[in-house]
Image: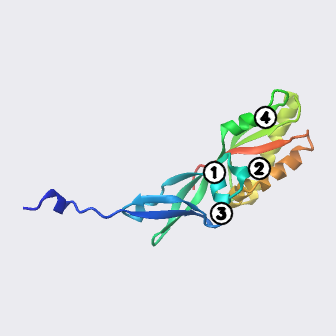
Amino acid sequence: MATKQEILKKKKKKWYSVTASNDFRNAVLGESYVDDINFLKGRVFKVNLMNITGDFKKQNINAGFIVNNIEGDHASADLISYEITPSYTRRLTKKAKTKVEDSFKLVSSDKIGVIIKILVIAKTKINRSVATALRKKSREIISEFLSKKTYDDFAKAVVFDSMQKEMRDKLNKIIPVPVCLIRVFKRINK
């Protein structure tokens, strides 16, 4: 009669590395210890953006990646979330300044839903009407950008700060805005 050990043959586990997409120069996100690499499909990795890009200015940003491509002993992941840490946003806010926040859902040109949360800090105290104008204009800028571009283009623009620079330039026409951030974005569906 066979023993339980003979019946339950276990596969030997191995370390598999997971890398980011080509947008991040195939940076290594981490390694996972599994017996079959197919178990990695759909797994989410949370990584500090500074470790991927090598830019110390991005040490206050966390990014979420989901594994979607598996080729041989190699797994690659795509960006699904981007979040600035709350401690960093608290440091930016002062009493003599006005903080304007907004949260909304949009759809990119390739039909991927995105939740976006923005943070705009004015140089001085401002009226509610000016804060409303800032919210409205920033929503217009982002929705116009997303209607023309794919989700990957939007994610790349946010991670490498070109979207925030464009927003700051346009919002400065309303009132001086030293800080304009996309605080959070998350992919809803694919």
Is the N terminus in the top left, top right, bottom left or bottom right quadrant?
bottom left
In the rendered image, is residue 115 in sight?
A: no
Q: What's the mark number on residue 142?
A: 2
Task: Find the distance from the CA under tag 3 to the CA under tag 2.
Answer: 22 Å
Residue bearing the label numbered 3: 24
N-term-proximal mark, 3 vs 2:
3
Residue 97 on image: x %, y %: 84, 31
Residue 35, horizontal then vertical, whole percent: 36, 62
Q: Earlier in the sequence, mark 1 or mark 2?
A: 1
Taking the image as shown, residue 42 lies to the left or right of residue 105, namely left
The amino acid on which the numbered mark 3 sits, given as a three-letter code, is Phe
Within 10 Å of the Cα at label 2, are there few (<14), some (14-19), or many (20+) other Cα atoms? some
Circle 3: is it few (<14), some (14-19), or many (20+) Cα within 10 Å? some
Provide the residue designation for mark 4: 100
Mark 1 secondary-structure assignment: strand
Q: Where is residue 14 in the image (x, y as percent from the top left)?
A: 39, 64
- Of labels 4 and 1, earlier in sequence is 4
